[in-house]
Image (spheres, helix red, strand yellow):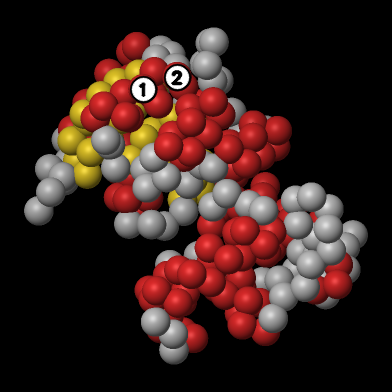
Amino acid sequence: MDKIKVLIADDIMILRQGLKAVLSQNDGIEVVALAENGKEAFEKSRVYAPDVVLMDMRMPEYDGAYGIEAIKKELPNVKVLVLTTFDDDETVDKALMSGADGYLLKEMEDEKVISAVKSAYGGISVFGDGVYRSMMNRMAKGNKEINASSKGSVNMAGEEISFSDREREVLKLVAEGYDNKEIAGELCLAEGTVRNQISKLLDKIQLKDRTQLAVYAVKHGLDE
């Protein structure tokens, strides 16, 4: 079985080395490169083709958001997990809008970091407990302020859009964390059909990835 290739981006060398030591304890993971900022993470991702990138957010010159956007634009199949000490709303939102596949805090136990890397590799978005609760609280608050019907939904350009029953079903399952195979099973569809449906939804709402799609669905009451 091939190992999961991981790249670690952090501006503090001792933390990079420490994470490498932690992840290297697992036989199923191989740390292929280290980077000290977002630009270097992107450049090394092009060279080493990692499966998962562990990305700090606040780094000098080129931060995590820069690295996430660059990687996702050119290497969309690479999963990017944010691993940082900052859990304020602004930093979390910046990471997600840049295309991050998950958001973890450095206070997590070693085994949970390893588990998160494996989950991200398997296509599951991973969020630390505190970060997830904060996101849900903010989304719940937002739901009280908007019309949860399709008429109240807008794309990123502010244009009103509506959704078919099938689109709403897919959005609901994406918001609940289902992957394409699981959605296909729930809705009795081919996995390729689900993949195409999600691609069309991303274009329709003008979003980058399924993490942003899930956030959008919850915010606009489409997960109910």
- Separation of disc 2 and disc 1 at Cα? 6 Å
In the image, residue 138 lies at what x, y percent? Answer: 75, 51
Of the pair 214 and 156, the residue shown nearer to us: 156
**Residue at x-position 77% and y-position 73%:** 162
Disc 1 marks a residue whose amino acid type is: Glu
Are the residues flagged by discs 2 and 1 in contact, CB closer than 8 Å?
yes
Left or right for 29, reference 77:
left
Left or right for 146, reference 59:
right
Vertical position of residue 27 compared to residue 85: above or below: below
**Residue at x-position 44% and y-position 89%:** 188
Does residue 217 show up? Answer: yes
**Which residue position is annotated with label 1?**
43
Of the pair 121 and 190, the residue shown nearer to us: 190
Disc 2 marks a residue whose amino acid type is: Lys
Give the crowd class for mark 2: few <14, some 14-19, many >=20 residues within 10 Å: many
Q: Under tag 2, what secondary structure?
A: helix
Residue 147, by quadrant, is: bottom right
**Which residue position is annotated with label 2?**
39
Residue 27, by quadrant, is: top left
In the image, residue 204 lies at what x, y percent? Answer: 67, 62
